[in-house]
Image (spheres, grey):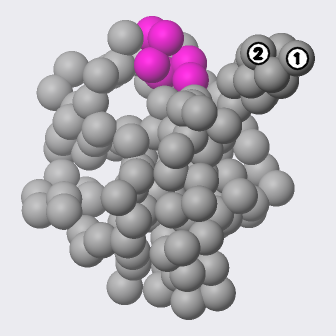
Amino acid sequence: MTVLVTDTGFGPETWTTGFEAENVLNLASDADPIEVAKALDGIEMIRVNFPSFADGRGFTIARQLRLLGYDGRLRAEGHVIADQYAMARRSGFDEVEISDDLATRQPEDQWLARANWQAHDYQARVRARAAAK
């Protein structure tokens, strides 16, 4: 089983048409977003695999797909950890799919601590420090 992580916390799977459906694209971490962008007609969800939490290529893929105009559902899937949730959201992912095992090791409160991802980026911290002086 898997757990879906969004800004509101843990939840059940909400995708009902199956991951092998024609409207879902499953991408490896070494996919070329430029090539993928040529075949996005009818694609409602893209799942980008993270084979390891140390492999950040999926963040680049998400950002490039958004810059290329993809506005469908974008999901990070695999070895994403709570500390990476804000980066996942900032790069363009709508949600993160994790294993039950990871959800046990990193409970919902650890993910929710990063759910306010828009306020905790580097620029926001710099602006806050400047305003405090």
Q: Position of residue 123 (x, y in %)?
A: 74, 19
Q: CA distance from mark 2 to mark 1?
A: 6 Å
Principal SS element in the magenta part? Answer: helix
Which quadrant of the rendered structure holds the N terminus? Answer: bottom left
Q: Amino acid at mark 2?
A: Ala
Q: Helix, strand, or loop for circle 1?
A: loop
Q: Are marks 2 and 1 in contact (CB under 8 Å)?
A: yes
Snapshot quadrant of residue 5: bottom left
Residue, x 39% and y 42% (percent of image)?
94
Which residue bears the numbered disc 2?
131
Q: Please state the extent of the stretch shown in magenta in the rendering.
A: 62-68
Name the one closer to the observer, 123 or 96.
123
Q: Position of residue 35 (x, y in %)?
A: 50, 18
Snapshot quadrant of residue 120: top right
Label 2: few (<14), some or many (≥20) within 10 Å?
few
Residue 18 seen by the camera:
no
Which quadrant of the rendered structure holds the C terminus? Answer: top right
Instruction: State yes or no: residue 127 in magenta.
Output: no
Q: Residue furthest top?
A: 68
On screen, residue 101 versus residue 25, left or right, reads: right
Name the one closer to the observer, 122 or 23.
122
Please tell me the numbered disc located at residue 133.
Answer: 1
On screen, residue 27 versus residue 9, left or right, reads: right
Q: Position of residue 100 (x, y in %)?
A: 47, 86
